[in-house]
Amino acid sequence: MSKAFYRILVWLWMGAGWCLNVSPAAEAPQKTQMDGYLLVPHERVDAKYNGGFSMYVAAWPLLRNYPGQEFQSGLFGTWMFAQYEGPRPKDIYSDIEGGLGWWRDTRFATETPKFIMGGVALNFSEWANGPGAGKGRNWNKPAGHYAVAQLSPWVLWPPDGLNLKQGTAGELFGYGYLPLPLTAPKKTTAGAPVPTGNHCWTLFLNTRNFKGPVTFFLPYFWSKPTVQKPELAGMFLDSRPSEPNKALQMETQYIPAYIAQDAKGVLYARVAPVQFPGKPGEAAPLIHRMTAYSKAALWEKVEAWFEGGPPASGRIDPQAAAVHLFKGGGGATWRIRLPQAKPEDPIRVDWTAFAQPVALDELTYGYRWNKEWVSKASATSGNLVSLPEYYRLDKDQKGRQRWVPVRAAEVPRETGLAKVTFPQRRTVNPEPYVTPEEPDSCWKKPGPAAGPFRVTLGDGSVVTYYWYRFADQPALLNADLTEAEREAIQKRVELLHRYWTKDREYLPPPTVGKLAELDAALLVTPPKGLEVGYVPIVTRQQQAGPSYRKAQEDSIPKRIVTIRKSQEN
């Protein structure tokens, strides 16, 4: 074959390729990510409303398919910092910043979000996500593992996060933190001459199948760093009120995406199917009734009760509150990263092409979805829309690069993006959460009053739990409290268990939407004789499987539930 003839064949092959819109030099799509914030403006309230907050946020499956543990995103939430008389001091980061979402260390994740508490001690030295859940899993060096006490006798808290009902799709999850005076102020902390306050920041929930307080941060969690840094005494949430004017955002750290180039060098991207509550051309509530409270809303009544006054109902007084009002507007920093770009050089998605931030009313915020670009997620997804999956790198009117949505038919075939898939993934054989089992550990001495019990959750995990006398739960034994101090808290908690029943209203109810539900398997009933003053504590969470189910079946005839005689009364 002559060189001339060879060149003609190559020329004909390349020409045919262009006619077929297929590039012979096309590269495979490169894996990348989409991330960023959604910013929600709201009106400020008076600084006197520094006794905690509550709000209702939509709970839904952000991604159509859970893609694996790389995925990390919160849903809408906030950061509650301590309030100071002047500017917030530098270099002492500490707050409560949990909420609904998915995290890279979530071991039993599904498309349905979970809730974590997200307390952060000084500069992330420790953090606490719930009872038995802290920074890492090393029980020899607990870092927030004992920071949260179980308060409710009716709700289990798994270490992997509080489960919502599978299939939740846009319902409102009501939660908030208000301080309760369960402990007494201390003049010394861990033997050091630094004080610890008595603010027990307590998580209240309002869901369809449970309402009321569930857990609380022990004050020692916040003050513990001052033992080594006494100059910071009195600077944290154990003694300081809360800052009422908080940021309201949705923080997304990773959504899988791919980028490819067409024959002309134009860049295109495809993102994993993203979902939001709403309908094409309409809006649905995403945030509702964001409220800041003064201490008159709950603290003052409870304090008087504990000092011998009449029982406090537990109803959080809306007359001692200020609601942040919405007027619409807002920002979005979602960006699709170029594989070779620097992190500080993001290219944003043209969010406004398909989403208009609106105030549905002055208490409710959401997005109105452009029906030209969004579609109903699926026939079984409920009230959800799918956002655009495909984008082209373009420029806006000011010459800035932007990822603009395009339809699938507009994406050249040679990019290969049409063949990209975003399958559902699950962690294979996730490592179980296991608490210390040594006979001399605080989990065994004085130990539980009843158990073990086991339930299977909607995420496919099995939790093992025991009933502990409130003051004997491991968190209380690691809270820098004397036996007398723990017994004083025990008496106060017994009052709460008698009067603050699960059929009462606590947080001000929503005026729009429907309430979300907790996973029904988390709702428990205390054993007979342990109805008051006892709480369920999870000691193990593991993946359900054939071997587990067989072992469980084999153990049923032999299972013995023990109740310590000394504690029956």
Image (tube, rainbow, N blue to C red):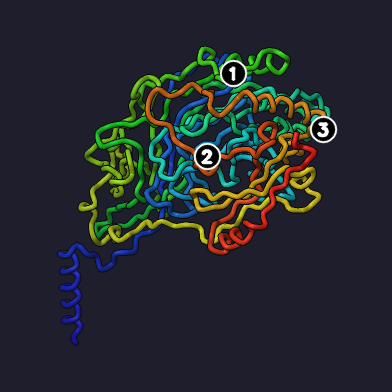
Neighbour tally class for label 2: few under 14, some 14-19, many 20 plus, Cα within 10 Å: many
Q: Marks 2 and 3, how far apart in space?
A: 32 Å
Neighbour tally class for label 1: few under 14, some 14-19, many 20 plus, Cα within 10 Å: some
Q: Which residue is mark 1?
A: 313
Asked if one can make out residue 393 in the rendered structure from this viewpoint, the answer is no
- Figure quadrant of the C terminus: top right
Percent from the top left, x then y, of residue 36? 43, 41
Q: Which residue is mark 3?
A: 483
Residue 7's disc number = none
Q: Which residue is mark 2?
A: 115
Residue 478, picture quadrant: top right
Cβ atoms under marks 2 and 1 closer than 8 Å = no
Q: Earlier in the sequence, mark 2 or mark 1?
A: 2
Q: Nearer the viewer, mark 2 or mark 1?
A: 1
Eyeballing the image, is 359 above or below 99? above
Eyeballing the image, is 560 above or below 197? below
In what element is the residue under mark 1? loop
Query: Which residue: 29% across, 49% down?
Result: 390
Neighbour tally class for label 3: few under 14, some 14-19, many 20 plus, Cα within 10 Å: few
Q: Earlier in the sequence, mark 1 or mark 3?
A: 1
Percent from the top left, x then y, of residue 263? 24, 60
Q: Earlier in the sequence, mark 2 or mark 3?
A: 2
Residue 53, picture quadrant: top right
In what element is the residue under mark 2? strand
Q: Is residue 254 left or right of residue 390?
A: right
- Figure quadrant of the N terminus: bottom left
Query: Which residue: 36% across, 21% down?
Result: 327
The three-letter amino acid code for the residue at tag 1 is: Ser
